[in-house]
Amino acid sequence: MKKWIAGAATALMTLTGAAFAEGHGDYPDRPIMLMVSYGAGGATDFQARIVTMTAGNEDALGVPIAIINKPGAGGRVGWNWLASQAEADGYTLGAYNIPHFIAQSIEGGVSYTADSFEPIANWGADPAVFVVAADSPFNSMQDVVDYAKENPGGLTFSGAGLFVGHHIAALQLEKAAGVKLAYIPSNAGGAGAMKSVIAGEVLGGVNNLSDAFRAREAGNVKVLGVFDLERNSFMEDVPTMAEQGFDIDNASVNFRGVMVPKGTPQPVIDHLAAVVPTMFENSSVQGKMSAGGSPMHVMTREEVQEMWTARQATLQELLAGL
């Protein structure tokens, strides 16, 4: 009898998996939560709310996605929670930031690695930029570096946390320019780091291009350089670091997307992986992202898996060198 029950249960699970694969399962049948490891108002939170706004449509997931913020320690608080406490049932998703959580796992002291999560899809690629207040005397990265050389350790600038894209960009700048900077991580993420620049609490900051776009539109900051291989279409007047004579690549570019905890049922992962990229490609979503100065880069689950693997290798080498 026990063997019969076990066999029946296995058959039922197989049928359920097939139903999911064909889109006939009951999942999802209630609202889904997306955990964001940064505070409200920052680039990740801002973008996550846009890219999930069509989730309730019949041609998407058919249920809404609610954003839950769990900020702290450069994202560590939220990702620790997602890896160790969240239910792996498909109703708890997480927003990822690369290189952030991979770099943090390499440095240690956290409860997660890339193997703690399953990627679903990528929505954006947001370069880091160097910003100063609108009334700053600095008008180029050379001005910033000259000041840093004249005042070793005296150039204070903000970023979203330790071993996030901003911090990696800062470490690269120190190495490329041969200077020592005073990096001050914000406990309030990118939004808090930008406020520190605007308020004059620091001399500059490394932030997301999307945050800087909105701050520049408001007349609050100047953007002096972008940490990427090419200029960005949202700020075509801002030169790359390489253009200004600093050997810095795109290792700090912030990829953002959706993932789930390890152990989430494969049929659920497959369903999300099929549907979520179509949400990102929705014309209304893309229009709002463009209006907010938020660069999009949609990738499928398989493409994200390849990107994670490549970034893991790049960051291990980069952080060892820095």
Image (spheres, helix red, strand yellow):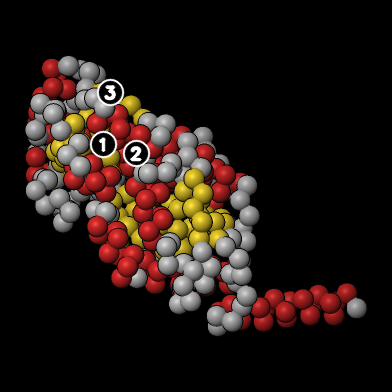
Q: Residue at x 62, y 75 (%)?
A: 26
Q: Residues within 10 Å of mark 2 (few under 14, many from 20)?
A: many
Please state which of residues 10 and 126 is positioned toward the viewer in this rendering: 126
Query: Which residue does the numbered mark 2 point to in the structure image?
Result: 191
How packed mark 1 is, by other alpha carbons closer than 10 Å (few <14, some 14-19, many 20 or more), is many
> Residue farthest to the right?
1
Rounded to the nearest angstrom, the CA distance separating label 2 from label 3 is: 14 Å
Within the image, what quadrant is residue 89 found in? bottom right
| Residue 192 located left or right of residue 274 | left
Q: Earlier in the sequence, mark 1 or mark 2?
A: 2
Amino acid identity at mark 2: Ala
- Looking at the image, residue 79 sits to the left or right of residue 322; the answer is right
In the image, what residue type sits under mark 1? Val
Identify which residue is drawn at 30% across, 70% down: 283
The residue identified by callout 3 is 201
The picture quadrant where one finds residue 25 is: bottom right
Q: Give the image location of residue 237, x and y in percent.
A: 9, 48
Instruction: Tell me if I can see residue 137 in this picture.
Output: yes
The x and y percentages for residue 93 are 52, 57
Q: Residue at x 9, y 33 (%)?
A: 139
Residue 222 location (% of width, % of height): 15, 37
- Residue matched to label 1: 206
Q: Which quadrant holds the C terminus?
A: top left
